[in-house]
Amino acid sequence: MAKDTVSVTDNVTGKTIELPIYHGTLGPGAVDIGKFFREFGYVTFDPGFVSTASCRSSITYIDGEKGQLLYRGYPIEQLAEKSSFLEVAYLMLHSELPSQDEQQAFLEKITRHTMINESLKSFYQGFNHDAHPMAIMVGVVGSLSAFYHDSTDIRNPEHREIAAHRLIAKMPTIAAACYKHSIGEPFIYPQNALSYCGNLLNMMFSMPCESYEVDPVAQKALDMIFILHADHEQNASTSTIRLAGSSAANPFACVASGIAALWGPAHGGANEAVLHMLDEIGDVKNIPKFLEKAKDKEDPFRLMGFGHRIYKNFDPRATLIRKMCHEVLSKLGDENDPLFELALKLEEIALQDDYFKQRQLYPNVDFYSGIIYKVLGIPTNMFTVMFAIARTVGWVAQWMEMIGDPDQRIARPRQLYEGPVMRDYVEFSKRS
């Protein structure tokens, strides 16, 4: 990592210091401000950390201007077309694509860890049947450290790897149990003969009293969605996991904290918001009216699932999932379903509207993933749970990278204090 410097002068005192500039393999350089406070006595002010690099990472790279997303250097387009979710999981954890033997060994390890401790079944019964699945998932994942003591020593590389495998393997089982609990159906055990996504679908939709056949189109669509959602740089939930992990918390607690952050509607709830928006629009004939509302800055209505904070041109994941969405709709969807007709018409009109074209407000990955989930029969309150399953791969990869970073310290952001200056306590009897 090459190092240059930048000169910074305090115009009040006239003092000048040199700050190192670090250059990664891609993207903008980073100014090391470690001695800024020590030399100048100032802290930097960056709400939301939008201009702050909180860590070094070699996992994911995004170029929002080019519409580029790389996992360990591989373009998302190539991985989504040619790879599988568990192969991407191996890549995230080990930096390189696996050989055939390595992939087979990895699949066997994941398969071996898909079961959850039987005692966890009673844990689910402590939640009301109408509890949000994300609330259940936060609790269950956080409790895993009470069951798997042999993988909570974060300084032991073998423990870290076992914990990573367990989290990736058990998340579909935990998620399916959340769903089954909400509808009052019996939990379904994982089947070792099924694929990762096939297993999830089977655990969600099969019943002990009858056979269930996993649809290959549904399995393929789910696998692609999971690849597209596997990681996305230092987003809110990933940063939360690194923040929690910096205190040496166990990996299950860290991932539970990430799930809690993902639950926020501004982060993981976008595809759920798309469905609510479509319900609000209601009918194809109402689209023009709602498009005008979206253009009105004084109107609170917003088109959900269009544009992206990071991607200023287009979301490369949306290009991939759009094709899959249309394939799923044509093979599994009800052509007469007004919701799907509305979604496709909204997409068509928005793509042709100059207002949205000029602002690059194209449908993003959340617009299409919500529709796919709907076609597959996954209820809206499970959308963010599905996101959490996929993102677990990125979370554990980021956590393992952080633990192995020799420069890692416990996170301790500063603040700009705007409260009262020091004052003396006033006796109760003397207060007016």
Image (cartoon, grey):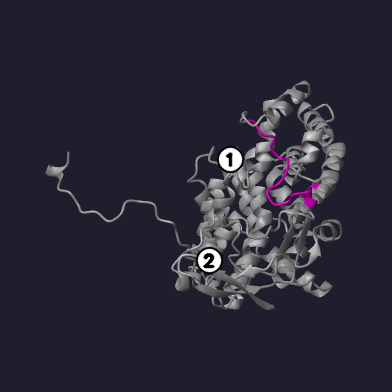
Q: Where's the C terminus, which quadrant?
A: top left
Q: Nearer the viewer, residue 240 or 48?
A: 48
The quarter of the picture where residue 103 lies is bottom right
**Residue 400 position within the rendered picture, expressed as x and y whole percent measured from the top left:** 61, 70
- Alpha-carbon neighbours of circle 1 within 10 Å: few (<14), some, or many (≥20)? some
In whole angstroms, how far apart are the C-alphas of marks 1 and 2? Answer: 31 Å
Q: Residue 182 shows which numbered tag?
A: 1
Are the residues flagged by discs 1 and 2 in contact, CB closer than 8 Å?
no
Residue 396 or residue 317, whichever sits in front = 317
Residue at figure coordinates x 78%, y 49% from the top left = 313
Say if 65 sits above or below 353 in the image: below
Quadrant of the snapshot with the N terminus = bottom right
Q: Main secondary structure of the magenta part?
A: loop
Q: Is residue 227 left or right of residue 122?
A: right
Instruction: Name the residue located 61 percent from the left edge and 31 percent from the top edge.
Output: 300
Looking at the rendering, the stretch of residues picked out in magenta corresponds to: 301-318
Q: Check if residue 303 falls in the magenta segment.
A: yes
Return the x and y of residue 204 as percentages of the image width and height.
Answer: 68, 46
Left or right of 298 in this view: 305: right
- Seen as rendered, the residue at the extreme top is 285
Any part of residue 191 in sight: yes
Give the label on residue 245, or none: 2
Where's residue 79, x and y in %? 82, 60
Residue drawn at x 83%, y 37% is 329
Of marks 1 and 2, the one in the foreground: 2
